Amino acid sequence: MSNITLQEALLMAADAANLGHSCINDLGSLFQAIIKIADASPSTSNHLTVEMAKIGQYLADDWAYKINREREEIEALRGPH
């Protein structure tokens, strides 16, 4: 087991938070695309698809916000770099 410094641990945590934030943003973009496609051809099943995608987009936005807040806290702990 290797010993790492606090700064190295914070950098690793920041990298993980950045990756998580990026992935969640990509997921939100996917839900936005589903909404646009389904809205282009209105039907009962597409309406349900849109509603489900809106829920998914809301959850993705919520998680992106939470991860971003964690990332900001990690960056504050790291200090100037």
Image (cartoon, rainbow, N blue to C red):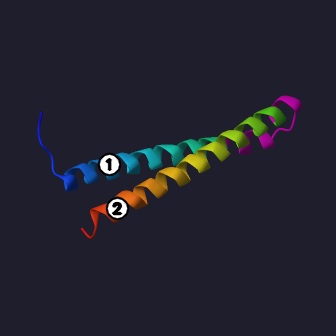
Where does the image place residue 20, in percent across and percent down from the top left? Answer: 43, 44
Q: Are marks 2 and 1 in contact (CB under 8 Å)?
A: no
| Mark drawn on residue 75 | 2
Res. 37 image quadrant: top right
| Mark drawn on residue 62 | none
Q: Residue at x 46, y 48 (%)?
A: 22
Prevalent SS, magenta region: helix
Q: Secondary structure at mark 1?
A: helix
Farthest residue, direction top:
45
Give, as a single range, the part of the protein colored magenta: 32-46
Q: Residue at x 41, y 56 (%)?
A: 71
Residue on which the image places disc 1: 13
Q: Earlier in the sequence, mark 2 or mark 1?
A: 1
Q: Is residue 2 magenta?
A: no
Compared with 44, 81 (above or below) is: below
Side of 61 where 21 appears, left or right:
left
What's under tag 2, amino acid-wise?
A: Glu
Where does the image place residue 29, in percent across and percent down from the top left? Answer: 59, 47
Res. 7 image quadrant: bottom left
Q: Dividing the image into 4 quarters, which one contains the C terminus?
A: bottom left
Q: Residue at x 83, y 36 (%)?
A: 47
